[in-house]
Image (cartoon, rainbow, N blue to C red):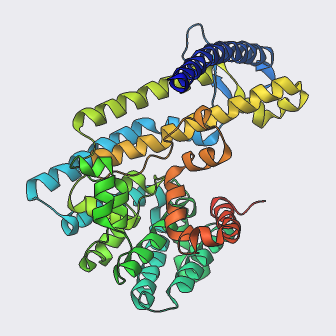
Amino acid sequence: MAISSTMKKKKEKEEYWKRKELVFLVLYAIAFYAFIIHRSLQLSLDHESELYALRPGWLLPPRLNDVSDAQWRNFRANLPILFLVFALFALLANSLRALFSLKAKGMSFVWLLISLAYLSYLHGACVLFILSIASLNFLLVKIFAQTKYFSPVLWLFNIFFLLCNRVYEGYSFSIFGQQWAYLDNYRGTFRWHICFNFVILRMISFGYDYHWAHQDPLFDQQKHIQRCHTCKSGKTCYRLLQERSVQKEKFSFSIYLAYLVYAPVYIAGPIISFNAFVSQLDTPQNNYTVRDMSWYGLRWLFSFSLMELMTHLFRYNAFAISHLWKMLSPMDIFIIGYGVLNFMWLKFSLIWRFFRFWSLICGIEAPENMPRCINNCCNLESFWKNWHASYNKWLVRYMYIPLGGSQRKLLNIWVIFTFVAIWHDLEW
C-alpha cells in the first residue's frame, strides 16, 4: 500500500510539472512569434526601397508583394491556366472512365493522349527526346530484368542521361543534322530536361517493379493488412499499393508511357511508384471521399491565402536574393533565415498539394510530400523524412533497401546523398 501511495504521489507530481511546462511553452511560443512578427514587419518596412523583385500587391492599404522567388512567381502567375487545365483534364478522364467502364489498359490510353497534349504545349518538339529516352529505357528493362546485370545497366543508363541532359541543356536538334535545326524554334514554354528528372525516377521505379515481379515476394501482404489501420478499415493504404506487385501484362508499353507522363504529377510530383499508379489506374483510390477531397481543397485555399498575406507583409526571400541580410545583426539574420525556411516550406507545400489534389480527383492517390509542418520537426531525421516525403520513400525503396539497407548504412548514406545532390542540380 505504501509503495502504491508513493507511486501515486510521484505520478501526480509529474502531471503537475507537465502542466507547468505546457503553460511555459505556450507563453514562450506566443512571446517568440510576437517578437518574430514585429521585427519582421519592421525590417520589411525599413528596407523596402532597397529590396529586389517587389511588385504592386492587392492588400489594402496598398502594399508591395514579394515575388522574388522565380518558382513561386511562375506558379502563381500560371494558376488560372492550371486550374482550367485541371478542370478539363479531370472532367474528360473521369467521364470516359465512367461511360466506358475503363480499366488500366483503357485508362492508360486516355491519360497518354491527354498527357501528350499537355507535354506538347510545355515542351513542343522536345517531346521527341522524352519519348526516345523512355523507349530505350523500356527496351533495356525488358531485356535485362531477369539477368544479374539489371541493376548496373538500369542505373548507368539513367544517370548517364541525367548528367547529359543537364550538361547539354536539353540538346539541340541541330546536332542530329541541319535538316532538323528548324525544330529548335518549337521547344515549348518549359525546359523539358528540368521535368525529366522526375521522369528518370519513374523509369527506375518501373524497372525495379518489373524486376521484382519476376521474383518471390518478400512483402507479407496478410501480416501487413492485420497491422495496418487503413487496410483493416476496408481501404487500401499507399504502402500496400506500392509493395503489392501487379500482373505482368500490366507492364506494357502504353501503361509505362502513361505512367511516365501522367499529367497531374508530371511537372513537380509527388513521386508515385509504378505499382501504386497501375493499381489505381485499374481501381480508383477509395481513401479520400468527396468530402475529404473538398476539405483538402479548402485547406489548400487557406494555405494560399496565408502565403499571399505572408509575401505582402514580410520580405524574407527578397532579403535573401538582394544580399541585404549581410548588413543585418545576427538576430535579424536568424529572423530572415527562419522566415525563408517557412516561406520555402509553404511554397513547396502549395505546389505539391495542388498537383496531388488534381491527381486525387482523377482517382490516383500520390504520397503527401509535406506531411508535417517544418516547425513541428524536432530533429534532422524528422525534417529529412517530412520534406519531399515521396522522394524519401522512393530513395528508401529503390536505393537504400537494394544497397543493403541498415546493414551498410554508413556506405549507403554517402551513395544516396551523392545521387540526391546530382539529381537536384549539377552546380556545387
Rendered view: 238 above or below 313: below
Q: Position of residue 102 (x, y in %)?
A: 15, 61
Left or right: where 215 falls relative to 21: left
Residue 32 found in image quarter: top right
Residue farthest top in this picture: 61
Q: Position of residue 425 (x, y in %)?
A: 68, 60
For this rendering, which residue is in front, 253 or 288? 288
Q: Residue at x 28, y 60 (%)?
A: 111
Rendered view: 54 above or below 272: above
Left or right: where 348 falls relative to 144: right
Rendered view: 101 above or below 175: above
Q: Residue at x 42, y 27 (%)?
A: 301
Residue 14 found in image quarter: top right
Q: Position of residue 292 (x, y in %)?
A: 29, 35
Left or right: where 105 falls relative to 384: left
Residue 412 found in image quarter: bottom right
Q: Residue at x 17, y 63 (%)?
A: 103
Instruction: Report whether residue 186 is seen.
Output: no
For this rendering, which residue is in front, 17 or 122? 17
